[in-house]
Image (spheres, grey):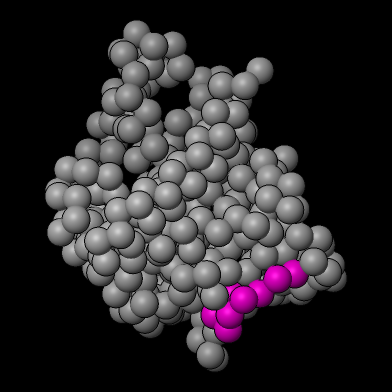
Amino acid sequence: MLPYAAYLRVYEPLTAFAEPERSAWAQYADSRDRPRRATALQVEHAQALRRLLAAPPVVVPGQESRDAYVRRSGGMTYVSPWQTRLRSWVAFTRFRDSLPAAVADAFVPAPLADQVTGEFERWKRQSRTVRPHILSSTWHIPIAWFVPFVPAERWLVLTSGPKTDDHAAGGGRVHEGDSPVTPAPVRTLVYVTSMAEARRRVERAVAVVRSGLGEDRAWSEVQTVGWWLAEFHAEALVELDYGGLVQLFDDQALSTDQSVAEASVALAGLEQGKVELTLAMYRRLLTRWRFVRALEAAN
C-alpha cells in the first residue's frame, strides 16, 4: 500500500550534472542493485516509515540519498534524484508552519525541531539553490500540475504484466502518444513531456490566466510551477505521476480520468472568452479532486 500522494518530477540528462556527480549517476543508472521503477516508491516509503518510527523520530536523514529515478530515451539517460534529505527539510518546514506551535511540538519536540531548522538554514547558506527534482502532493493533484501536459502524453497501465527494466509492460495498458514514458509495470497513470513543451504550455497558461483572471485568482499556482521548471536543464523531461492516488480509483475511473484535457479546455475557454466552458471544466476538476481529498478525513 503506497502513500496517497502524487509526484511531479524533473529528469535531467546526465550532461546537466558536473563531475564527479555525472559519472556517479551514470554508474548508478547501469547498476543492477538500484531500486527499479516498479519498487522505487515502496523503497522510499519504507525508508520514511523507519525514520518516523524511530525514537525519537528521524525528521531528516543525516546524509543525502544516493538514489534516483532513471529514464532512457533517444539514446540518452535521464535521472531524477530522490533528494530525500532536501525534500524532508522542505516538507518539515511547511508542516511546522502550517500548525500551531503546541500541535507541531506534539509530533516533533521543540528542541529537535529547532535543531532540524538550524541545520536546514546552514545548508541553504552553503548550497547554490534549494531545488528539489521531485514535488509531492498528498490526497490530491494541484490543478496547476496538469498544465504542462496534453492528453496524448498519457500512459495508463491498469493490470500488471512481465517486468522489464525501467519500462512498462503488461495487459490493460493504454498509451495515447509517443512520449518517452517508462512507468512501472504495475497499475499506473503518468504523463511525460519534454521540458521545452512544459515551459511553453505553462508560459501560455500564465499569460491566459493573468489576462482573464488577474494575479490573485484561481490557477495562481501555475506561475509557481513555471518558476520551478525554469531551474532545470532545457533538455530535461517532466513527469506527472499519480503515484499512490491510483489506489483511490477503480479501473473505469482511471480510464475516464481526463484531468489534463479538462485543464487544457478550461484554459482554451478562458482564452477565447467562453466563460461557461471554462467554469464547466473547472468545476469538473474541482468535483473529481474534492471527492478524493475528502477521503483524507474518512474513518
Q: Quadrant of residue 91?
A: top left
Q: Which residues are magenta?
A: 173-181
Comparing 194 with 31, the one in front is 194
Residue at position x 66%, y 74% in the image: 175
Q: Does the magenta portion include 178?
A: yes
Q: Position of residue 131 (x, y in %)?
A: 31, 56
Q: Is residue 209 visible?
A: yes
Q: Residue at x 68, y 50 (%)?
A: 253
Question: From the image, which quarter does the N terminus lie in?
Answer: top right
Q: Position of residue 255 (x, y in %)?
A: 68, 59
Q: Is residue 195 left or right of residue 262?
A: left
Residue 47: x percent and y percent? 60, 41
Q: Magenta segment: does it hold 179?
A: yes
Horizontal arrangement in the rendering, residue 254 relative to residue 91 (left or right): right
Q: Residue at x 50, y 35 (%)?
A: 290
34 w.r.t. 106: above or below: below
Q: Is residue 231 left or right of residue 139?
A: left
